[in-house]
Image (spheres, helix red, strand yellow):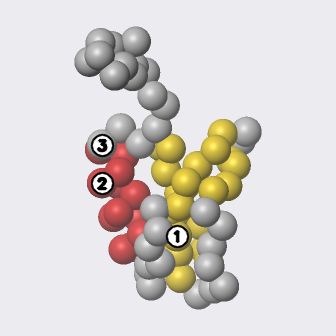
Amino acid sequence: MEPEISRRFEGKKYMWDGALYAGEAEARAKADSYMKGGFETRLVGHEGGHVVYTRRVVTAAVTAEGQLK
């Protein structure tokens, strides 16, 4: 069975990164790379493997005119 696409942890929505990791070390390494990119991460055990959920708060958006909003 596929993991849930999104999950809430502590009231915050996280999205699954789409990969299934065989070992915790592999999943943790991927989560660490996401954290270096500014994401919050959560590791979850899933059917003998692991999945990584991520989230990042958007602080600015670019409008169609190319302006920061």
Q: Tell me residue 53's x, y (percent).
A: 53, 57
Q: Quadrant of residue 61?
A: top left
Residue 14 vs 49, above or below: the answer is: above
Query: Few, some or many C-alpha atoms within 10 Å of disc 2 (few <14, some 14-19, many ≥20)?
Result: few
Mark 3 residue type: Gly
Nearest to the observer: residue 28 or residue 7: 7
Q: Quadrant of the C terminus?
A: top left
Q: Is residue 33 above or below residue 29?
A: above
Tell me if mark 1 has few (under 14), some (14-19) or many (20+) residues whose alpha carbon lies within 10 angstroms of its own. many
Indicate whether 2 appears above or below 59. below
Which sits in the foreground, 34 or 2?
A: 2
**Label 2 near label 3: C-beta < 8 Å?**
yes
Q: Is residue 62 visible?
A: no
Q: Amino acid at mark 1?
A: Val
Quarter the N terminus occupies? bottom right
Label located before the other in sequence (1 or 2): 2
Give the residue number, with chain letter if any, for mark 1: 51
Q: Residue at x 36, y 19 (%)?
A: 63
Residue receiving disc 2: 33
Residue marked by disc 3: 37
Kind of residue indicated by mark 2:
Ser
